[in-house]
Amino acid sequence: MKSFARLSSVCFILLAGVVQAQELAPIPDLHIPAVPYVDQGAELSQPMVGDPVVFVDPVVYTGTIFTRVKYTDVHEMSPCAQPKLIMVKNPCADEGCCEPAMVCIEICVPTRGCEEVTCRRFGNRIRYDYGKYAVDVRIKRDYIQVDYQD
């Protein structure tokens, strides 16, 4: 009889442990305020579009322009192109360095047409597409390459 009592008490303890283990604790909300929250269950009414680069008016800008820029295929530039200043990542900036994180460069873009900007590789490849003409900006190790496409 003692063995039956011990066996039943052990079973009761094990059963109580299993019941407590099945009660799930609530999961804390780990939402980071700087990152926009998108409900995966809801359908987006508008596509989420970010700003990969910042545009600067050439007339108003009084700062320095980054000089280590290599322009390729300049003959493929639009004939009615006008200069435009854009802010891109600094290829010479390292972590803990006093260099600015963004630099200003000048590209020439067509005056007409709808601009479509695509950004890839964490901002190291930027394409300004104007239909027939396009401008590719690539951040290299020590310089920036601007490639014109027709």
Image (cartoon, rainbow, N blue to C red):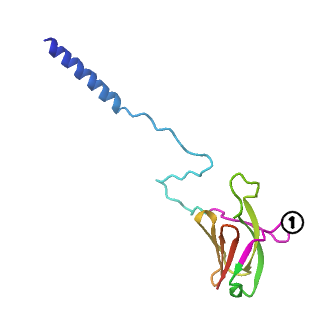
Q: Quadrant of residue 83?
A: bottom right
Q: Is residue 65 magenta?
A: yes
Residue at image x 72%, y 76%?
A: 70
Rendered position, 77 above or below 138: below
Instruction: Using a 10 Å C-alpha cutoff, classify the residue at mark 1 as few (fewer than 14 neighbours), some (14 to 19) or many (20 or more).
Output: few
Residue at image x 25%, y 21%?
A: 12
Q: Which residues are magenta?
A: 50-70
- The extreme left residue here reads 1
Answer with left or right where residue 57 lies relative to residue 127: right
Q: Which residue is mark 1?
A: 62
Where is residue 120 drawn, in percent x and y? 59, 67
Residue at image x 71%, y 88%?
A: 75
Q: Amino acid at mark 1?
A: Thr
Overall secondary structure of the magenta section: loop
Q: Quadrant of the N terminus?
A: top left
Give whichever of 62, 44 is nearer the camera: 62
Where is residue 79 drawn, in percent x and y? 74, 88
Rendered position, 80 above or below 89: below
Give whichever of 120, 80 is nearer the camera: 120
Where is residue 100 drawn, in percent x and y? 76, 58
- The extreme top residue here reads 2
Q: Quadrant of the C terminus?
A: bottom right
Q: How many marks?
A: 1
Q: Quadrant of residue 82?
A: bottom right
Find numbered disc 1 in the image and state the secondary structure of the residue it sits on. Answer: loop
Give whichever of 1, 142 is nearer the camera: 142
Q: Quadrant of residue 4?
A: top left
Give whichever of 102, 47 is nearer the camera: 102
Q: Is residue 86 magenta?
A: no
Rendered position, 52 above or below 10: below
